[in-house]
Image: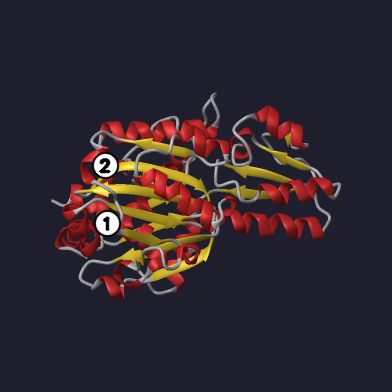
Amino acid sequence: MDESVHKFLRSTGPVLCVDIGSGTQDALLARPGLECENWPRFVLPSPARMVAQRIRELTLLRRDLWLYGGNMGGGFSQAVKEHLRAGFKVWSTPAASRGIHDREDVVRGMGVEFCTVCPEGCVPVFLSDYAPDFWAGLLRMSGLPQPHMVLAAAQDHGHHVEGNRLGRMLMWNRLLAESADPASWIYSTPPPALTRLQPLHDKTGGPVADTGASALLGALCDSEVMDRSFREGITVINVGNGHTVAALVYKGLVRGIYEHHTGMRSLEQLLADLEQFRKHWLPAEEVQATGGHGTAFGPYCEEAGGYLPTFITGPRRALLQGHGRFLAPHGDMMLAGSLGLLWGWARTHAD
């Protein structure tokens, strides 16, 4: 990790970095005075998976439940549907229901009822992507200091009348138009349209980013990858449990973004998409027609050539075995997003 990070830590103190995916939440506690390799790290089930497990326990116990808290990742929605199909009731506050769907009429259509207080006989289930008490307790029991700052990332579709997939690509287009430097894609305060990052920021009190941006920064914090991008255009791919995000990068700046659902593309289909994406020939509408999010291209995309050197990270990177170089920034692939958050923020905020 470069000197800007260590300088930032010396002035800030311990920083907890949490990258929240659909399958896992990957965290490291960056501590001043220690080498990066000696920073404590955790790979735990994602908060949504833990909520889903709790709901399924209550289904087995034949108990009605009440969801409260705030918007979070929707990986527990299938457990809610199973609970309802089993004949048990699900109540929710309006804020918590947004983890299932942004539109309350859609949530009601599933059979969920709304209530601002826990109905009698229901078991409350708290929803949050980040629980301060959980992390404080885990660090305390591990004999570790409490953080002076929390950096966190989660994927945010936002809420858009046009549809979440279209809205997400509007987000990527806006980011590319405002700044091609992915370090600037970490928000000190997220915009109102990002309805998942807002409650995450409220809980952590610190900067937040989309997981697509954090993974990209995690790849670029590898000095060999960054240096290569100054010689020629490169492609960086994060193959996540839920989503695959690819970026065209030249001179450390992002020229294009591709995003699809990992489980919806075979190897052959993904390689075909990437070939067209590198040539800037893949329209967003074509990706959306196959169930993906789309593509977004920034200015000067053509100046770098073919973007053939490919660097791959993410928990499902084996899908692209043999089609690029696998990355493990600072020796830990699962912590790429957390390392990217720290490196990206420190680059622009080290005193």
Residue type indicated by callout 2:
Ser
| 60 vs 306, nearest the viewer | 306
- The residue beneath circle 1 is 220
227 sits to left or right of 281: left
Q: Residue 294: x percent and y percent?
A: 47, 38
Q: Mark 1 or 2, which is nearer the eye?
A: 1
Residue type indicated by callout 1:
Leu
Label 1 environment density (alpha carbons within 10 Å; few <14, some 14–19, many ≥20): many
Looking at the image, residue 334 lies above or below residue 285 = below
* Numbered label attached to residue 184: 2
Q: Earlier in the sequence, mark 1 or mark 2?
A: 2
Label 1 SS: helix
Looking at the image, residue 289 lies above or below residue 61 = above
Mark 1–mark 2 Cα distance, whole angstroms, equals: 14 Å
| 325 vs 172, nearest the viewer | 325
Q: Residue at x 51, y 36 (%)?
A: 286
Asked if the residue at tag 2 contacts the one at tag 1, i.e. Cβ–Cβ closer than 8 Å, the answer is no
240 sits to left or right of 59: left
